[in-house]
Image: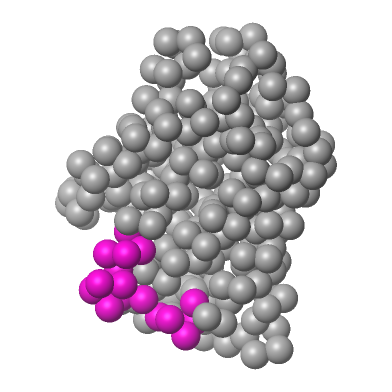
Amino acid sequence: MPIELILLLLFIGAGTGSVSAIIKIAPALIAIPTLYFFLPVFNVSFDDFVLPVIATCLTAFISTHLYTWIKSMKNGAVDFQRLINFTPGVVMGAVVGAQLLSLISPAFFKVAFSIISIVGILSFAFSTKIEGTKSLSVSKAFQLPVGFLVGVASLISGNCGRVLAGCLFSINKTSLAKRQGTIDGVVVFSSIAAMVGFIYPARTFNDFGLTAFAGAIHLPSLLVLTASHFFFFWLCENKGSELDKKVLSVSFMLFLTFALIRLWI
Protein backbone atom coordinates (compact mmCIF):
# COMPACT_ATOMS: atom_id res chain seq x y z
CA MET A 1 0.00 0.00 0.00
CA PRO A 2 1.35 3.46 -0.83
CA ILE A 3 2.17 5.61 2.18
CA GLU A 4 -0.25 8.27 0.92
CA LEU A 5 -3.15 5.81 1.13
CA ILE A 6 -2.13 4.76 4.63
CA LEU A 7 -2.07 8.40 5.75
CA LEU A 8 -5.48 9.02 4.15
CA LEU A 9 -6.97 6.04 6.00
CA LEU A 10 -5.40 7.20 9.27
CA PHE A 11 -6.98 10.64 8.87
CA ILE A 12 -10.35 9.13 7.95
CA GLY A 13 -10.22 6.86 10.99
CA ALA A 14 -9.32 9.82 13.20
CA GLY A 15 -12.21 11.88 11.86
CA THR A 16 -14.85 9.16 11.97
CA GLY A 17 -13.73 7.90 15.37
CA SER A 18 -13.69 11.25 17.12
CA VAL A 19 -16.95 12.53 15.61
CA SER A 20 -18.94 9.30 16.09
CA ALA A 21 -17.74 9.10 19.71
CA ILE A 22 -19.25 12.49 20.48
CA ILE A 23 -22.45 12.68 18.43
CA LYS A 24 -23.13 8.99 17.62
CA ILE A 25 -23.30 9.17 13.83
CA ALA A 26 -22.76 6.42 11.26
CA PRO A 27 -19.01 6.67 10.48
CA ALA A 28 -19.55 5.45 6.91
CA LEU A 29 -21.38 8.71 6.15
CA ILE A 30 -18.04 10.47 6.60
CA ALA A 31 -15.66 7.79 5.33
CA ILE A 32 -17.34 7.03 2.00
CA PRO A 33 -17.65 10.63 0.71
CA THR A 34 -14.06 11.32 1.81
CA LEU A 35 -12.79 8.35 -0.18
CA TYR A 36 -14.91 9.50 -3.11
CA PHE A 37 -13.10 12.83 -3.03
CA PHE A 38 -9.55 11.47 -2.62
CA LEU A 39 -9.39 8.15 -4.50
CA PRO A 40 -8.86 9.94 -7.85
CA VAL A 41 -5.52 11.14 -6.40
CA PHE A 42 -4.41 7.50 -6.66
CA ASN A 43 -5.71 7.25 -10.25
CA VAL A 44 -8.61 5.11 -9.06
CA SER A 45 -12.19 5.81 -10.06
CA PHE A 46 -14.61 5.50 -7.15
CA ASP A 47 -17.26 4.20 -9.54
CA ASP A 48 -15.07 1.17 -10.28
CA PHE A 49 -14.18 0.65 -6.63
CA VAL A 50 -17.55 1.02 -4.87
CA LEU A 51 -17.81 -2.50 -3.48
CA PRO A 52 -14.32 -2.75 -1.90
CA VAL A 53 -14.58 0.76 -0.44
CA ILE A 54 -17.89 0.06 1.29
CA ALA A 55 -16.95 -3.48 2.32
CA THR A 56 -13.68 -2.34 3.88
CA CYS A 57 -15.23 0.67 5.64
CA LEU A 58 -18.20 -1.12 7.16
CA THR A 59 -16.07 -4.06 8.30
CA ALA A 60 -13.44 -1.75 9.82
CA PHE A 61 -15.99 -0.19 12.18
CA ILE A 62 -17.25 -3.51 13.63
CA SER A 63 -14.80 -3.59 16.55
CA THR A 64 -15.89 -0.13 17.73
CA HIS A 65 -19.59 -0.97 17.37
CA LEU A 66 -19.03 -4.15 19.37
CA TYR A 67 -17.13 -2.24 22.06
CA THR A 68 -19.94 0.28 22.55
CA TRP A 69 -22.63 -2.41 22.52
CA ILE A 70 -20.86 -4.50 25.17
CA LYS A 71 -20.57 -1.40 27.36
CA SER A 72 -24.28 -0.72 26.91
CA MET A 73 -25.14 -4.31 27.88
CA LYS A 74 -23.00 -4.07 31.01
CA ASN A 75 -24.89 -0.90 31.97
CA GLY A 76 -28.27 -2.49 31.26
CA ALA A 77 -28.92 0.06 28.52
CA VAL A 78 -30.24 -2.32 25.84
CA ASP A 79 -33.88 -3.10 25.05
CA PHE A 80 -33.39 -6.78 24.26
CA GLN A 81 -37.04 -7.33 23.32
CA ARG A 82 -36.87 -4.69 20.58
CA LEU A 83 -33.54 -6.13 19.50
CA ILE A 84 -35.01 -9.63 19.25
CA ASN A 85 -38.02 -8.31 17.35
CA PHE A 86 -36.13 -6.62 14.52
CA THR A 87 -32.58 -8.00 14.38
CA PRO A 88 -33.35 -11.31 12.56
CA GLY A 89 -34.86 -9.36 9.66
CA VAL A 90 -32.02 -6.83 9.68
CA VAL A 91 -29.42 -9.61 9.56
CA MET A 92 -31.07 -11.30 6.59
CA GLY A 93 -31.47 -7.96 4.86
CA ALA A 94 -27.81 -7.07 5.46
CA VAL A 95 -26.58 -10.27 3.82
CA VAL A 96 -28.86 -9.72 0.84
CA GLY A 97 -27.93 -6.04 0.66
CA ALA A 98 -24.22 -6.86 0.63
CA GLN A 99 -24.81 -9.25 -2.24
CA LEU A 100 -26.90 -6.73 -4.15
CA LEU A 101 -24.21 -4.11 -3.68
CA SER A 102 -21.88 -6.12 -5.92
CA LEU A 103 -24.53 -6.15 -8.66
CA ILE A 104 -25.96 -2.62 -8.69
CA SER A 105 -24.52 0.20 -10.76
CA PRO A 106 -22.55 3.10 -9.21
CA ALA A 107 -25.37 5.45 -10.22
CA PHE A 108 -27.90 3.39 -8.24
CA PHE A 109 -25.56 3.42 -5.25
CA LYS A 110 -25.26 7.20 -5.45
CA VAL A 111 -29.06 7.51 -5.38
CA ALA A 112 -29.31 5.16 -2.39
CA PHE A 113 -26.47 6.90 -0.54
CA SER A 114 -28.06 10.29 -1.20
CA ILE A 115 -31.38 9.13 0.22
CA ILE A 116 -29.83 7.67 3.39
CA SER A 117 -27.75 10.83 3.83
CA ILE A 118 -30.83 13.05 3.54
CA VAL A 119 -32.62 10.85 6.07
CA GLY A 120 -29.61 11.20 8.37
CA ILE A 121 -29.59 14.99 8.00
CA LEU A 122 -33.34 15.27 8.63
CA SER A 123 -33.19 12.97 11.67
CA PHE A 124 -30.52 15.23 13.17
CA ALA A 125 -32.28 18.46 12.26
CA PHE A 126 -35.76 17.42 13.44
CA SER A 127 -34.92 15.04 16.28
CA THR A 128 -36.95 17.11 18.77
CA LYS A 129 -40.05 17.08 16.56
CA ILE A 130 -39.69 13.33 15.96
CA GLU A 131 -39.61 12.77 19.73
CA GLY A 132 -42.80 14.80 20.02
CA THR A 133 -44.79 12.59 17.63
CA LYS A 134 -47.01 9.75 18.75
CA SER A 135 -45.54 6.28 19.07
CA LEU A 136 -45.98 4.06 16.03
CA SER A 137 -45.85 0.40 16.98
CA VAL A 138 -44.98 -2.33 14.48
CA SER A 139 -47.13 -5.44 14.76
CA LYS A 140 -45.44 -8.79 15.22
CA ALA A 141 -46.32 -9.90 11.68
CA PHE A 142 -44.42 -6.94 10.18
CA GLN A 143 -41.35 -6.93 12.41
CA LEU A 144 -39.39 -9.35 10.21
CA PRO A 145 -40.23 -7.58 6.90
CA VAL A 146 -39.48 -4.15 8.41
CA GLY A 147 -36.15 -5.40 9.74
CA PHE A 148 -35.36 -6.94 6.36
CA LEU A 149 -36.06 -3.66 4.57
CA VAL A 150 -33.87 -1.78 7.05
CA GLY A 151 -31.01 -4.21 6.41
CA VAL A 152 -31.27 -4.17 2.61
CA ALA A 153 -31.77 -0.41 2.32
CA SER A 154 -28.88 0.28 4.69
CA LEU A 155 -26.37 -1.93 2.90
CA ILE A 156 -27.10 -0.86 -0.66
CA SER A 157 -26.62 2.74 0.51
CA GLY A 158 -23.29 1.97 2.17
CA ASN A 159 -24.61 2.23 5.72
CA CYS A 160 -24.34 -0.06 8.73
CA GLY A 161 -27.99 0.39 9.69
CA ARG A 162 -27.54 3.14 12.30
CA VAL A 163 -29.56 5.78 10.45
CA LEU A 164 -32.65 3.68 9.72
CA ALA A 165 -32.50 1.80 13.04
CA GLY A 166 -32.32 5.15 14.80
CA CYS A 167 -35.41 6.33 12.93
CA LEU A 168 -37.23 3.07 13.66
CA PHE A 169 -36.54 3.16 17.40
CA SER A 170 -37.38 6.86 17.57
CA ILE A 171 -40.75 6.34 15.91
CA ASN A 172 -41.74 3.44 18.13
CA LYS A 173 -40.47 5.30 21.21
CA THR A 174 -37.88 2.91 22.51
CA SER A 175 -36.76 4.17 25.92
CA LEU A 176 -34.20 6.97 25.57
CA ALA A 177 -32.03 5.33 28.20
CA LYS A 178 -31.86 2.13 26.17
CA ARG A 179 -32.22 3.44 22.62
CA GLN A 180 -28.56 4.01 21.79
CA GLY A 181 -27.52 0.61 23.14
CA THR A 182 -30.30 -1.07 21.16
CA ILE A 183 -29.22 0.72 17.98
CA ASP A 184 -25.63 -0.38 18.64
CA GLY A 185 -26.84 -3.98 18.86
CA VAL A 186 -28.60 -3.74 15.50
CA VAL A 187 -25.50 -2.17 13.97
CA VAL A 188 -23.24 -4.94 15.31
CA PHE A 189 -25.37 -7.74 13.89
CA SER A 190 -26.00 -6.03 10.56
CA SER A 191 -22.28 -5.25 10.13
CA ILE A 192 -21.24 -8.83 10.88
CA ALA A 193 -23.89 -10.18 8.51
CA ALA A 194 -22.74 -7.73 5.84
CA MET A 195 -19.14 -8.87 6.34
CA VAL A 196 -20.20 -12.41 5.46
CA GLY A 197 -21.84 -11.11 2.29
CA PHE A 198 -18.74 -9.08 1.42
CA ILE A 199 -16.42 -12.07 1.86
CA TYR A 200 -18.56 -13.98 -0.66
CA PRO A 201 -19.80 -11.28 -3.06
CA ALA A 202 -22.25 -12.21 -5.78
CA ARG A 203 -19.89 -10.77 -8.39
CA THR A 204 -16.14 -10.25 -8.29
CA PHE A 205 -14.42 -6.96 -9.07
CA ASN A 206 -11.20 -5.65 -10.56
CA ASP A 207 -8.68 -5.32 -7.71
CA PHE A 208 -6.56 -2.71 -9.51
CA GLY A 209 -3.39 -4.63 -8.75
CA LEU A 210 -3.86 -4.57 -4.98
CA THR A 211 -3.41 -7.80 -3.02
CA ALA A 212 -4.54 -9.27 0.32
CA PHE A 213 -8.29 -9.26 -0.29
CA ALA A 214 -10.83 -11.37 1.61
CA GLY A 215 -13.67 -11.32 -0.90
CA ALA A 216 -14.28 -7.61 -1.40
CA ILE A 217 -12.52 -6.55 1.83
CA HIS A 218 -9.00 -5.13 1.48
CA LEU A 219 -7.29 -6.42 4.63
CA PRO A 220 -4.35 -3.95 4.92
CA SER A 221 -6.71 -0.99 4.56
CA LEU A 222 -9.06 -2.66 7.03
CA LEU A 223 -6.35 -2.93 9.69
CA VAL A 224 -5.22 0.69 9.31
CA LEU A 225 -8.76 2.08 9.37
CA THR A 226 -9.85 -0.14 12.27
CA ALA A 227 -6.89 0.85 14.46
CA SER A 228 -7.21 4.57 13.75
CA HIS A 229 -10.99 4.66 14.15
CA PHE A 230 -11.04 2.67 17.39
CA PHE A 231 -8.18 4.65 18.97
CA PHE A 232 -9.76 8.04 18.31
CA PHE A 233 -13.20 6.78 19.33
CA TRP A 234 -11.77 5.60 22.63
CA LEU A 235 -9.83 8.86 23.04
CA CYS A 236 -12.91 11.06 22.50
CA GLU A 237 -15.55 8.86 24.12
CA ASN A 238 -17.79 10.73 26.58
CA LYS A 239 -15.96 13.95 25.79
CA GLY A 240 -17.38 17.24 24.59
CA SER A 241 -19.90 19.65 26.07
CA GLU A 242 -23.41 20.22 24.81
CA LEU A 243 -22.09 23.14 22.78
CA ASP A 244 -19.45 20.88 21.22
CA LYS A 245 -22.13 18.38 20.28
CA LYS A 246 -24.32 21.05 18.68
CA VAL A 247 -21.40 22.46 16.70
CA LEU A 248 -20.34 18.98 15.54
CA SER A 249 -23.93 18.12 14.60
CA VAL A 250 -24.24 21.24 12.45
CA SER A 251 -20.81 20.61 10.92
CA PHE A 252 -21.76 17.01 10.16
CA MET A 253 -24.97 18.08 8.43
CA LEU A 254 -23.10 20.69 6.39
CA PHE A 255 -20.44 18.13 5.43
CA LEU A 256 -23.09 15.69 4.21
CA THR A 257 -24.93 18.42 2.33
CA PHE A 258 -21.82 19.56 0.45
CA ALA A 259 -20.77 15.94 -0.10
CA LEU A 260 -24.10 15.25 -1.82
CA ILE A 261 -23.70 18.34 -3.98
CA ARG A 262 -20.20 17.22 -4.95
CA LEU A 263 -21.47 13.70 -5.60
CA TRP A 264 -23.84 14.88 -8.31
CA ILE A 265 -22.18 18.01 -9.69
Q: Which image quadrant for residue 103?
A: top right
- Residue 69 falls within the magenta-colored stretch: yes
Compared with 164, 219 (above or below) is above
Q: Main secondary structure of the magenta part?
A: helix
Q: Tell me, what colour scheme is on the image? A: one colour
Compared with 108, 121 (above or below) is below
Residue 206 lies, in percent from the top left, at 75, 23
Q: Say which quadrant the C terminus sits in.
A: top right
Residue 37 visible in the displayed image: yes
Q: Along the horizontal axis of the image, is 127 left or right of 23?
A: right
Q: Which image quadrant for residue 147?
A: bottom right
Q: Which image quadrant for residue 144?
A: bottom right
- Residue under the point 61% across and 29% down: 213
- Residue under the point 44% across and 11% down: 4
Residue 112 visible in the displayed image: no
Compared with 36, 25 (above or below) is below
Residue 256 lies, in percent from the top left, at 52, 39
- Residue under the point 71% across and 89% down: 141
Residue 251 lies, in percent from the top left, at 38, 39
Residue 74 lies, in percent from the top left, at 25, 72
- Residue 107 falls within the magenta-colored stretch: no
Highlighted magenta segment, given as a residue range? 68-83
